[in-house]
Structure formats: C-alpha cells, structure tokens
Image (cartoon, helix red, strand yellow):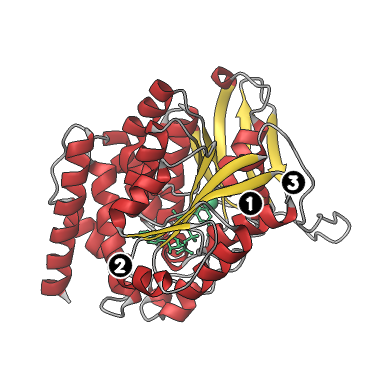
Amino acid sequence: MKKISILGSTGSIGTQALDVVRHLPEEFSVEVLTANSNVELFARQIKEFRPRVAVLADEAAYKKLSKKKFRGTELAGGRQALIDAAGFGASEIVLTAISGFAGLEPTIRAIKARKNIALANKETLVVAGEYITKLAELCGVEILPVDSEHGAFFQCLQGEDRRKIKKLLLTASGGPFRGKTRDELLNVTIKDVLAHPTWNMGKKITVDSATLINKGFEVIEAKFLYGVDYDQIQVVVHPQSIVHSMVEFCDGSIIAQLAAPDMRLPIQYALTYPRRLPSPIKPLNFWELNSLTFEKPDTETFRGLNYAYAMGKIGGTLPCSLNAINEVAVNAFLQGRIKFLDIFTVIEEVLTRRDVFAPTLENLLEEDRGARQLAERYIELAY
Ligand code: NAD
Ligand code: MG
C-alpha cells in the first residue's frame, strides 16, 4: 500500500482525491489529512479514512474538532501544526490541494522531508518556481502534476525526450465569459463568475479561470515543470475541455491526451504513477461527441494571461507579486468590495508599484506580505 498525505482534503481537489482512494482501497493508506475550517466534513473524512494525523489550520475550528473522539488519529491545530504535518511520517507522496500562497510552506516542508509531491497547488510554482524545482532536485523528489493540463503534458511525454519538445499546447476552456466583450462584463455578478461551464472547482480558481489568470499561472507552472521557454508555450482555447493539452515535437508530431473533464483522472495518475489503474470516470463516446473546437484566446478582454507571460519572463519576485495581488483582488471581489473588471485594474495598478528582487525564499515571503498590503491599501482608497 502506498502511504499518502492530503493537504486540503475538504476542498474540490481534496474530496476528489479521497474519492480516488475510495475506489482503490487496496492501493492507498492515508497518513495525514489537513484542512482549514470545515469541521463536519473533516470529521467524516477522519472516520472514513482513519489517518494517523489530522490537522485543522484554523484554531477555533480545531477546538470544535477536538471535542470529538477519533480512534487512532492524532489531532492538531494551527498553521505550524499543518506545516509540520506536511513532513510527517512514512508518507511517500503528499498531495498539495491547499488553495493559494498558503500552500507554499507546507510544500517546502514535504519536499525537505523527501516526499514526492502530487502538485495541485500551482501557486507554489508561480510564486517560487525556481526555488521549488531546485529544492526538489536537491532532495531527489519528484513533482507530479495534478492540474489537468500538466497531467496531460506528463502523459504525452512518457518515453519521450524533453529536449525534442517544440511547443506545449496548453488548452483552456475560456471560462464562463468566453466571447463576451468588456462592456458585457461591467456588471457581472459573483454568481455569474462562479458558473464555470466545464469544471466544478474551488471559488478562487474559478474566478482565476474567468480572468484567464489561472491559464497564465498554468503557463508559469508548465515552464517550471518541463523546463521550456515561455515562447514555447501556446495557449489554445478549447471550450469542450476534452483535449486536456498537447505536445508538439520537433518532427511536427502532436500528441494529445483526451478524456472526459474529471479531475479524478489526473489526481489518480499522479498518485499511482508510473502505474495505470482502472478509474470510475465516464468513458468518451466518439459517436456522440459532436465536435472539438479550438480558437485563439481573447487577451484584450481577459488580460490575466498577458500578466503571467510578462511577469514570468522578467522573473525574480514579480510572479510572486502578481500572485499576491491577485489573491487580494479575488478576495475583494468575492466579498463584493470590487467588481469583476476591477480585478484587472487592481493587478495593473499595484504591479507597477512593485520592485523586482532575486527570488530567494526570504525575498518571496517578504514580497508576498508587501504586495498584499499594498493591494489592500489600494482597494481601500480606490473603491
Ligand atoms: P478549494 O477552495 O475547494 O479547497 C482548498 C482546500 O485547502 C480546502 O480543504 C481548505 O480547507 C484548504 N485551505 C484553504 N486555505 C487554507 C489555509 N490558509 N490553510 C490551510 N488550509 C487551507 O480549492 P480547490 O479548487 O480544491 O483548489 C486547490 C488547489 O488546486 C488550488 O491551488 C487550485 O489552483 C488547484 N487546482 C484545482 C483544480 C480543481 O479542479 N479544483 C484544478 C487544478 C488545480
Ligand atoms: Mg488546469
């Protein structure tokens, strides 16, 4: 049995990962579960999967949880306990399914404890791509992609020489507002933004998908996972989300990975790699698929993609600044403090006020704090 840890077990990726475990009971035993504050769901998960350690980051939620009795599971609470749990025990692989910058430090701890990483938390590579890939190499740790597009690249590249990659063709659904003009987006509501056409995900990534920031982050993620240049990554809008991404090789061949849009597949492949096992996902029926279409992204309206290429190319602490400002702007949008299109304005205004430093861990942590503070202040003053 493979021992696994799941950070962020109550979220969209976390619950689907536990569903993978449920379908393959002979394959996995769960060492560690962590979540933020959803006590009821977390308690049910502990009862069902009996991890050795279970941590809630939120102290008040932990107090509630600790009133319940669980046999064979050690409970802990707080941010530090969560980070420690990421490196705990005999786990071979840690699935990082926490959302946002909060996933960075637990991932670092897991790598230092020499655990392979099933990486869902793409923000880790956006913020600290260079640091993380070097650390993983130093510690002899594999980073296995969970993001569906990067899982597709990973599958397309099995048995291939990465030096023969000509282009990574990164597919994007286009989000809920594909085809809309800026004017049509002036008054969209939170509900409109959260109605993603093909994927059911956590709130933050769903907003990021609507701005194309998510796709931009995936460009940076792909760069660090596969060591290509930014110019070799091309985003292709594919509204049906059936082709999960493609690799073009130097001889002109293009290999794609197709499947129904169901995150349990890339999660399972990352957890069972290098083995392929049966999965519960719905098979594709090519007699019923009407058409698969492809188009160019509209980066005039959805500027998220441009920021990621621009900041990624300059590098240093700037991708970290972009991530921090975006997190603050997305939160403000979800709290109803700013409108959808303001997310772009906040990012542009605050980014121009950030300097670039070498991406040491210390500088990145510092920049995350600084950029957040400035973004908060900007929103307070401007809206
Ligand atoms: P989510 O919001 O549904 O779940 C997040 C999980 O992390 C929850 O268990 C929550 O309790 C925990 N968490 C959140 N903030 C925390 C904090 N500060 N400290 C500790 N725990 C915290 O998010 P999600 O959609 O599952 O996404 C998780 C990650 O996976 C993100 O980085 C996202 O970009 C990535 N991802 C998600 C999908 C998807 O389909 N949902 C696809 C690709 C990549
Ligand atoms: Mg993705």
Q: Position of residue 215 (x, y in %)?
A: 46, 51
Q: Secondary structure at mark 3?
A: loop
Task: Point out the frontmost of discs 1 and 3.
Answer: 3
Asked if residue 275 lies left or right of residue 287, the reply is left
Is 175 in front, or is 29? 29
Residue visible at 53% across and 71% down? Answer: 41
Is 66 in front, or is 204? 66
Looking at the rendering, in which quadrant would you find the C terminus? bottom left
Ligand 1 lies in quarter: bottom left
Q: Earlier in the sequence, mark 2 or mark 1?
A: 2
Residue visible at 73% across and 50% down? Answer: 24
Residue visible at 56% across and 44% down? Answer: 4
Residue 268 in view (yes/no)? yes
Q: Mark 1, residues whose alpha carbon is within 10 Å: few (<14), some, or many (≥20)?
A: some
When the figure is inspected, residue 31 is found, relative to residue 129, above or below; the finding is: below
Q: Badge 2 is on which residue?
A: 59
Q: Badge 1 is on which residue?
A: 294
Residue sticking out furthest to the right: 287
Asked if residue 237 lies left or right of residue 269, the reply is left
In the image, the residue with mark 3 has its CB under 8 Å from the nearest atom of ligand 1 = no
Residue type indicated by callout 2: Glu
Q: CA distance from mark 1 to mark 3?
A: 40 Å
Quadrant position of residue 169: top right
Q: Secondary structure at mark 2?
A: helix
Residue 299 in view (yes/no)? no
